[in-house]
């Protein structure tokens, strides 16, 4: 995804700004997808079951992302979180166990869009400004894109809890969560910032993807200035 500047690229927000790595260059590529259409653990999931679902993917040099549909309830979803990231130890590979990172994000469309899909739905609390038009005409999924991006930034910069974060380790503010609610310049509580607007649909966005897709991605904190860096 790209806009005027790269959202998570070499110019302003590379991993090198957050911590030093032994590898001179890190690369991220899309892996395989696994569909669980039969709801193997049912429609009410615990955190442990999320980890078990994540462990079905590659367990070495991987970030396994679990996305749950709008009809699935997850422990803590809506009441305290829209998604989470963490790590676990996988099965033995050639006699050795490796840690893998995982992300979980839920679709809040029918459960708590005011909490997990703002600014595409009016918030539960705070200033009640009008909701913005979702760029893909899907409040739940467009909200998921925001949360996946936020947690991906947190995972890449703090995969195992000993990377970049502010505040206490038990409740860390990470690369994106330190800038919650900021999507464009001039943002303040209840206002997402100065965004791009599609002249045809009226949808608000700040990033262009493949095949003409548009997305809204969160600001990332600049660790040198402690300011939130936006792409528009």
Image (cartoon, helix red, strand yellow):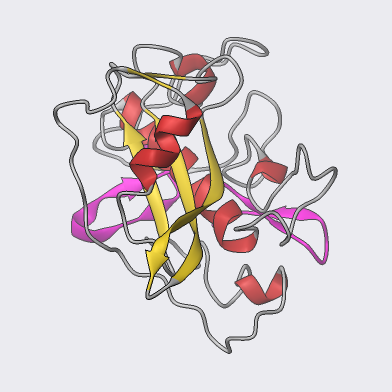
**Which residue is located at x 26 percent, y 36 percent?**
136
Whether residue 225 is visible here, answered yes or no, is: yes
Residue that appears at 14% across and 31% down: 37
Q: Residue 189: image x %, image y %?
A: 70, 26
Which quadrant of the rendered structure holds the N terminus? bottom left
Image side of residue 71 versus residue 124, left or right = left
Give 227 or 186, whichever is nearer the viewer. 227
Give the answer, above or below, for where 101 lies relative to 113: below
**Residue segment shown in magenta:** 203-232
Taking the spot 66% from the left edge, 37% from the top edge, the residue there is 187
| Residue 133 horizontal side relative to residue 6, left or right | left
Is residue 217 at all visible to an observer of this figure? no
Q: At 32% across and 37% down in the image, what residue appears? A: 135
Percent coordinates x, y for residue 122 in the rendering: 50, 14
**Quick check: is 209 in the magenta stretch?**
yes
- Whether residue 212 appears in magenta in the rendering, the answer is yes
């Amino acid at each position: 995804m790209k806009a005027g500047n790269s959202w998570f690229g070499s110019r302003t927000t590379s991993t090198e700004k957050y911590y030093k790595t032994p590898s001179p260059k890190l690369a991220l590529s899309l892996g395989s997808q696994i569909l669980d259409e039969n709801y193997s653990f049912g429609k009410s999931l615990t955190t442990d079951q999320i980890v078990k679902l994540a462990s079905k993917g590659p367990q070495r040099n991987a970030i396994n992302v679990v996305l749950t549909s709008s009809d699935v309830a997850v422990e803590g979803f809506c009441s305290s979180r829209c998604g989470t990231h963490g790590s676990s130890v996988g099965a033995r590979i050639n006699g050795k166990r490796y840690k893998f990172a995982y992300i979980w994000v839920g679709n809040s469309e029918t459960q708590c869009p005011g909490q997990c899909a703002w600014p595409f739905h009016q918030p539960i609390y705070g200033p009640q400004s009008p909701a913005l038009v979702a760029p893909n005409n899907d409040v739940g999924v467009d909200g998921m894109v925001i949360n996946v991006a936020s947690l991906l930034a947190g995972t890449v910069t703090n995969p195992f809890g000993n990377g970049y974060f502010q505040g206490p380790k038990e409740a860390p503010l990470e690369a994106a969560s330190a800038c919650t609610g900021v999507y464009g310049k001039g943002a303040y509580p209840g206002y997402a910032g100065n965004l791009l607007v599609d002249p045809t649909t009226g949808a608000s966005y700040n990033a262009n993807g493949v095949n003409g897709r548009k997305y809204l991605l969160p600001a990332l904190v600049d660790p040198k200035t402690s300011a939130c860096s936006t792409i528009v």
